[in-house]
Amino acid sequence: IETERVNWKSMPNISDLNGPGIGLTLSKSIPWDDFQKSIFEWLTQHKDYTVARQEYNQNMTICDSLRQALTGISGILVTPFNTHDEITTAPLIPIVDRTISAGVHILVSNGNTGEFYGLTTNESEHMVQTTAEIINGRVPLVAGIGKSVKDACQLAKVSAKAGADALMIHQ
């Protein structure tokens, strides 16, 4: 795992940790086993050993599930526009088809490359719905959400209804 910061408070289903969230700053790629040891060490320093062991087991189960779900190549799709700067989804069909046939394992709608911050919430909703229809279950779909809390919640609901498998939360 290569990352600059792992913040457990922001990860799904781990918001029930008591006290401050686990925040690790990693300056380089470290092996997964070393990462797991760091988490357990932090927990045992801040909690009773029995509680730490239970939380560690729960957190590692969630982390393993996330790692397995996000294994492979993720491709962030572009948002196609016409000459009038309006979204046009027809060009997205060959892009999705070619990306999947090239072996990309996970596709992302409304990611940074997809001009997420330049889209209205309605345009973002349209993109995730259209992308889900084009993908049609061939690969997992991650839907980008964010902007205001209200917009993020609305887009999360639309994304789930459209069939998104996961959410990428933009700040």
Image: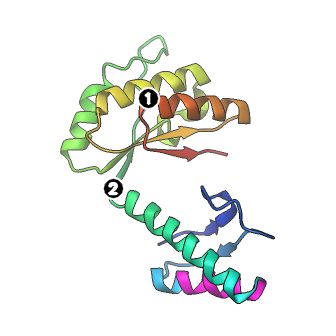
1 or 2: mark nearer the eye: 1
Classify residue 164 by image quadrant.
top left
Q: Secondary structure at mark 2?
A: loop
Q: Which residue is mark 2?
A: 73
Image coordinates of residue 167 in percent, x first then y, are 52, 44
- Residue density around tag 1, few if under 14, some if 14–19, many if 20 or more, within 10 Å: some
Q: Secondary structure at mark 1?
A: helix
Instruction: Give the magenta range.
Output: 36-46
As drawn, the residue found furthest toward the top would be 84
Q: Judge whether residue 142 can be spotted in this image.
A: yes
| Residue 160 in the image: above or below residue 63 | above
Q: CA distance from mark 1 to mark 2?
A: 22 Å
Q: Nearer the viewer, residue 18 or 82?
A: 18
As drawn, the residue found furthest toward the right would be 19
Give the amino acid at mark 1.
Answer: Ala
Q: What residue lies at 47% left-to-right and 85% top-to-bottom?
A: 33
Whether the magenta-drawn stretch holds residue 37 is answered as yes
Image coordinates of residue 135 in percent, x first then y, are 30, 33
Residue 105 as seen in the image, left or right of residue 32:
left
Q: What residue lies at 58% left-to-right and 30% top-to-bottom?
A: 155
Whether the magenta-drawn stretch holds residue 12 is answered as no
Q: Which mark is residue 170?
A: none
- Residue density around tag 2, few if under 14, some if 14–19, many if 20 or more, within 10 Å: few
Q: Judge whether residue 120 can be spotted in this image.
A: no
Q: Which mark is residue 162?
A: 1
